[in-house]
Image (cartoon, rainbow, N blue to C red):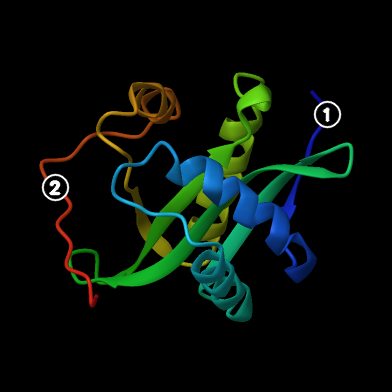
Amino acid sequence: MEAIIRRAKASDIPHLVDLLRDLFSIEADFEFNAGLQEQGLFMMLQSSETRCIMVAETDKNVVGMCTGQLVVSTSKGGFSGLIEDMVIRHEYRGKGLGSHLLGAVEKWCFSSGARRIQLLADKNNKKALRFYSKCGWQHTQLICLRKTAD
């Protein structure tokens, strides 16, 4: 399948919000709120040195997205890349777009100085976990904990 993998731009935000709606429908830990997701995406686009949104586009339609951010890792003594929001529209899955999109964000992380990259995935999303494993991602002994302000 012919696809373009490129950096997202502000005009993509409505399409990205729709993709997040799809993603959050399968992730038990997140609630979709279009206003909040739009705000977060806008924030991601404001700092292109430390944040990245890549999109997969076919026939001028955004059909996938993946975000990456740099954080400081004390264990690595430098930056670590945090990958989030990896999603491909259902009808485009299994065609290689996801691995190209994820690879583009991985490349951005490492070329931006990250010494390792990490991501979170829903533990019940077996298809996603198989996909990440096929892409060379390894499980760790760490678990994710969170606390919210609300």
Q: Please state which of residues 85 and 77 is positioned toward the viewer in this rendering.
A: 85
Give x and y (percent) for residue 109. 49, 59
Q: What residue type is labelled 2?
A: Ile
Q: Please state which of residues 17 and 8 is positioned toward the viewer in this rendering.
A: 17
Q: Report the side of 102 relative to 92 (left or right).
A: left
- Give me the disc on residue 2: 1
Classify mark 2: helix, strand or loop: loop
Q: Report the side of 58 relative to 110 (left or right).
A: right
Q: Which of marks 2 and 1 is nearer the N terminus?
A: 1
Count of marks placed on residues: 2
Classify mark 1: helix, strand or loop: loop
Check the image and report above or below for 41 versus 132: below
Give x and y (percent) for residue 84. 43, 53
Q: Which residue is drawn at 68% across and 26% down?
A: 92
Q: Please state which of residues 4 and 124 is positioned toward the viewer in this rendering.
A: 124
Considering every residue shown, the one lying at the far bottom of the view is 46
State if disc 1 and disc 2 touch (CB < 8 Å).
no
Give x and y (percent) for residue 30. 35, 52
Q: How busy is the neighbourhood of tag 2: few (under 14 within 10 Å), some, or many (20 plus)?
A: few
For the residues marked 2 and 1, what is the alpha-carbon distance in whole angstroms?
37 Å
Q: Please state which of residues 142 and 125 is positioned toward the viewer in this rendering.
A: 125
Give the quarter of the figure containing the N terminus: top right
Give x and y (percent) for residue 138. 28, 34
- Give me the disc on residue 143: 2
Check the image and report above or below for 111 versus 87: below
Check the image and report above or below for 127 versus 97: above
**Quadrant hosting residue 145:** bottom left
Q: Report the side of 4 relative to 114 (left or right).
A: right
